[in-house]
Amino acid sequence: MTRSRRRVAVLLHENERRDGVDSYAVGHLAEFWRQDGLDVRFLWGVEERVPADVLLVHVNLSVVPDAYLEFARGYPVALNAGVRDVRKSAFSANLLTPGDAWDGPVIVKSDLNYAGRPERKLLSSRTGWLRSRLLRPRRGFRSQLDYRVYARLADVPRGCFRRHDLVIERFLPERDGELYCVRTYQFLGPSQTTVRIASRSPIVSTGNHCRVESIEPDPAIVAARHAMAFDYGKFDYVLHEGRPVLLDVNKTTGAAARRDASLDHERRLRAAGIHAFLDDSARASGALA
């Protein structure tokens, strides 16, 4: 493989739709990689191994099956190969149980990434029945907009504490006057972008925002990303009374249906981060030669 045709492989779940890559940000980043002269291959499952300088593990499940991580270790540079579990219960510092001494507001969320929609989509086959049964969310929480904020812990329905698919956390919002804000930090290696999204709803989403502004990421969140071994992904956080609070981590970032110059500019910036990993791979190959 010549330098001009260095290869990037992206590993997806075996049940992922072949025509659904553009629903992920990585599908758009791949366009820029190809414009840069890279050979980009998408792999569905671990049955076939293709040579590549860099492999990105892009398995859209909250808990990545061991077979995928083991497969990734066979590549010179494997991105996110150290990220196995992105459930909120695995990283949140604000989890609550019924007897906790907390008198502030609380929020009830899905424990699984993206309210468990990937599990419903990818683990519905007969072969994945047991795993699907263990991880698939129950009725009532099918999207982020189903999250609920309560004035106090005692107001949370008792049944919520018995559900394996939910977490109850301290509700620590970032406020700007009457608005609620969430900061979204996206990255690929050294390339990163961060925006602050404002909404009138306490459940901030891209679908109900009223303002977006570019900002610098908080150093503590950047440090958390490295401590959690993320090479690629998205972290959502707030500054509550000046203190960063991590809300969500995502290693398979979705893509907005819209396309505009600003969004493409941000994607181009993040796409450039792949070259640092390609250089790592080249140095490793040189050391082994």
Image (cartoon, rainbow, N blue to C red):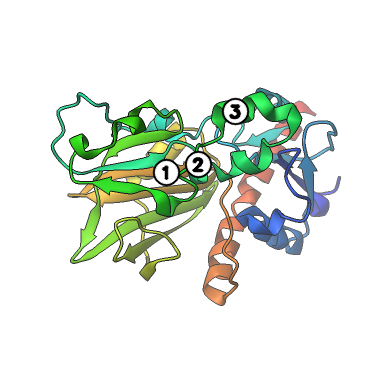
Q: Name the disc covering residue 133, or none.
A: 3
Q: Is residue 220 visible?
A: no
Residue 142 seen in this snapshot: yes
Check the image and report above or below for 178 versus 285: below
Q: Are marks 2 and 1 in contact (CB under 8 Å)?
A: yes
> Could you tell which of marks 2 and 1 lies nearer the N-terminus?
2
Q: Position of residue 147 (x, y in %)?
A: 37, 48
Return the residue at label 1.
Answer: 248
Query: Would you say 232 lies left or right of 124 here?
Result: left
Q: How many marks?
A: 3
Front residue of this view, candidates 42 and 97: 97
- Which is closer to the viewer, label 3 or label 2? 3
Q: CA distance from mark 2 to mark 1?
A: 8 Å
| Picture coordinates of residue 125, whole percent (x, y) | 73, 35
Q: Position of residue 112 (x, y in %)?
A: 49, 37
Disc 2 crowd rating (10 Å Cα; few below 14, some 14-19, many 20+) is many
Foreground mark, 3 or 1? 3
Looking at marks 3 and 2 on the same chain, the residue that comes earlier in the sequence is marked by: 2
Q: Position of residue 175 (x, y in %)?
A: 22, 59
- Distance, label 3 to label 2, CA atoms, is 16 Å
The image quarter in which residue 68 lies: top right
Q: Identify the disc placed on residue 117.
A: none
Residue at image mark 2: 113
- Above or below residue 131? Residue 249 is below
**Of label 3 and label 1, which has the lower sequence position?**
3
Point out the image quarter for the N terminus: top right
Say which of marks 2 and 1 sits in front: 2
Badge 1 crowding class, 10 Å Cα cut-off, few under 14, some 14 to 19, many 20 or more, is some
Q: Report the amino acid beneath label 2.
A: Asn
Amino acid identity at mark 1: Asp
